Amino acid sequence: MRLTTGWCFLTGLFVTFLSSTPSTAELLKVATFNVESYLDAPVESRQAKPLESRAKVKESILVMRPDVIALQELGGASALTELRESLQRDGLALPHWELLSATDTNIHLAVLSRFPFTASRLYTNESFLLNGRRFHISRGIAEIDIAVNPAYSFTLIAAHLKSKRASPEAEESELRLEEARILREKIDARLEANPELNLVVLGDFNDTIDSPPLRTVIGRGKTKLVDTRPAEGRSDSADGNGTRQRRSVTWTHFYSKDDSFRRIDFILLSRGMAREWIAEKSYVLALPNWGMASDHRPVLAAFEAADR
């Protein structure tokens, strides 16, 4: 009996030692960035993005050095090639990529990655009925399986929902909500197949956390997504009871129409992916003259690339 008790004690010490040993798992950095009409040539009503603005976009990405990044409002294939080659010349190689072309043929959704894609499901023709009319989701949805190493992989779903610009065909808020419902259908399909799936849902959702579109995307119950809510820095305060006060600077977008700053760019996680999330290494990038790059600021979340 003493031998068994002693063995249990030693085993407990060993487990405690393992749990307190620093992790050696690879660091994985995933980002999203609306690059505001990153066009290398004019198209219809959009002008080519000035060279100094494109340089600021590149600077922002190089500061973060993401392993995987979703870009919104990117021009066509030539703009993507120009950006990738420019990043590579400065030491950031992102050789794996997807570029979506949906109903909006002027600006696109793209995903760039240091790691290979094992599967890509690109939804560019999804539609919905609203007030008796059929609409198509304007920028598509990218769903990509990414292999970080032989033992760790995750699925990324990237989207760019309808903007707040008025539409002559329907209320912009209704259009955005319908697009959010389609996005949530993709999320549910993956989590129903595997509730423990490592899943990252990210992009420019063009609405705030308390809005119907965001509540739809985040969901409820066991498949509810975790909002990473990155900030500029660790500026939360605590009261006498240790309760965290939400005073961090988290805005991601400057809306010139009403001179406001809002958080509308999100990185959301399944419960499986949330176990690997490193909150203290996740942030909204704050750079001097950030507005030269875009009316959005990029958001990054960090993870340990090992299942927990």
Image (cartoon, grey):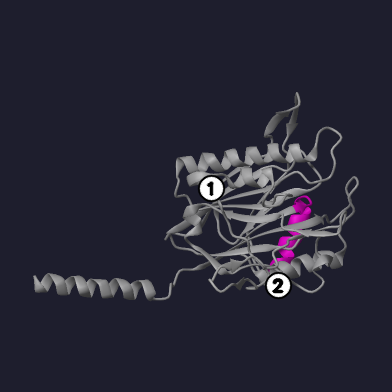
Crowding at label 1, few (<14), some or many (≥20) Cα neighbours within 10 Å? Answer: some
Relative to 297, is 149 on the left or the right? left
Picture coordinates of residue 71, whole percent (x, y): 71, 55
Q: Nearer the viewer, residue 119 or 25?
A: 25
Relative to 86, is 308 on the left or the right? left
The circle on residue 296 is none
Q: Which residue corresponds to the image point at 52% horizontal and 39% vertical from the top-left?
A: 189
Q: Which residue corresponds to the image point at 63% horizontal and 71% vertical from the top-left?
A: 236
Crowding at label 2, few (<14), some or many (≥20) Cα neighbours within 10 Å? Answer: few
Residue 76 is one of the magenta-drawn residues: yes
Q: Amino acid at mark 2?
A: Asp
- Precedes in sequence: disc 2 or disc 1: 2
Span of residues in magenta:
73-88
Task: Look at mark 1 in the image and give the residue it sits on.
Answer: 224
Residue lying farthest left? 1
Q: Nearer the viewer, residue 118 or 109?
A: 109
Is residue 148 visible in this depiction of the protein? no
